Image (cartoon, grey):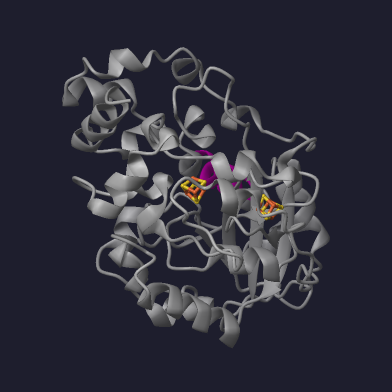
Amino acid sequence: MKSDDFFLETAANPCESASARTRGCLPTAVSPQKSTASHLIGDAVIRSALLDAGACAVGFAEAAPVDEGEWVAFQRWLANGKNAGMDYMHNSPDIRRDPRLLLPGARTVISLAFQYPQAPANNPGIAAYAFGRDYHKVIRKKIKKVLSELPEIYKNAKYRICIDSAPILERYWGVKSGIGYRGRNGAIIVPGYGSFVFLAEIITDLELTPSSPSTDKCIGCNFCIKKCPGGALNVNGEVNCTKCISYLTIEHRGEWDATGTEVMETEHGRNTLFGCDLCLSLCPHNRHTDSKVIPELQSTPEMLTLNPTELTTLIEEEYRCRFAGLPLSRLHHSDLTRNLRSQAQR
Ligand code: SF4
Ligand code: SF4
């Protein structure tokens, strides 16, 4: 899932490095100047530029505190320990509640979705997104290019790109900006494109016309809830990560506790190496979707030809080199070994 670090950039200086800004916590050296472009800009130019760059959905929401009901639900989810070992979800609650604290003068949250392909038929237990390159880098690069090529009138505006890189409730903003609606599997469903999508946000001081928030709901078939091997889902679309194979095989460090072990001993758990798509692949909203996958997010030959038995022979250094730039590299070698051991017991 994510780590909460920060990145700030402007279209005028899109190459500024993250590391210069991210040490410590809050962004520094931010000019309080207001964009002179704010009052002049409609949304069409930015929307079409982002869609042309490959996003399958783009929407705008006013940068404002998260609605009370959503915030209470998030706090309850945390209080119930459903974030499992992702302690960073407790960090920076003020910022997570109010995206204006991520960018002084912020007026708009732009939400984007980029589609990725579903997993190939001979999948050795790897989540579909992990067959592609590291989406954080791919999408950030795409967005930075769009921002750097916007017409001159936009150049004084400030932008901050968030791709799993800041404390922000991205699915809330996805709904608020109208790019999709929530499924009971916890995912955002983008009309026409389904939920095999990556989300990203751009916070800006541009004042863009808010899109209508999505009021649609998934069809409520409950396939995802009934079939989830760990019973990690409920009708509110909350994921209990302590029972979620995706969390257990990617985010969790070290050995699993009794609950995690029980989930990983299910048939689906034993067939999993990295992540889980079951609640997405079962969802009727992911059938017969349109396709708008940019070439950079297509599955890579390295992953499509991966022989899982090869993994068992790789020492840590070889593993790092072999999967550099691919999502599998997120996994600590010791946790890969744990997952392989679990698979071997099936
Ligand atoms: S990813 Fe898998 S384990 Fe997690 S909620 Fe979905 S079906 Fe359940
Ligand atoms: S599987 Fe059914 S209940 Fe679950 S998100 Fe999809 S439509 Fe909703």
Say which of 80 and 39 sits in front: 80
Image quadrant in which you'd find residue 166: bottom left
Q: Can residue 32 be seen in this view?
A: no
Say which of 137 and 74 sits in front: 74
Picture coordinates of residue 88, whole percent (x, y)? 31, 66
Question: Looking at the image, how many numbered discs can be counted on the residues?
Answer: 0
Q: Is residue 139 magenta?
A: yes
Residue found at the far bottom of this picture: 68
* Quarter in which the C terminus is drawn: top left
State left or right for residue 155 relative to residue 284: left
- Say which residue appears at 59% left-offset and 42% top-offset: 142
Give, as a single range, the part of the protein colored magenta: 138-146
Picture coordinates of residue 165, whole percent (x, y)? 42, 57
Picture coordinates of residue 268, whole percent (x, y)? 45, 35
- Say which residue appears at 75% left-offset and 42% top-offset: 52
State left or right for residue 242 relative to residue 345: right
- Say which residue appears at 25% left-offset and 24% top-offset: 319
Relative to 159, residue 15 above or below: above
Q: Can residue 201 be seen in this view?
A: yes
Relative to 227, residue 324 above or below: above
Specify the principal SS of the magenta part.
helix
- Say which residue appears at 62% left-offset and 78% top-offset: 63
Q: Does the magenta stretch include residue 326?
A: no
Relative to 42, residue 297 above or below: above
State left or right for residue 42 relative to residue 67: right
Say which of 274 and 148 sits in front: 274
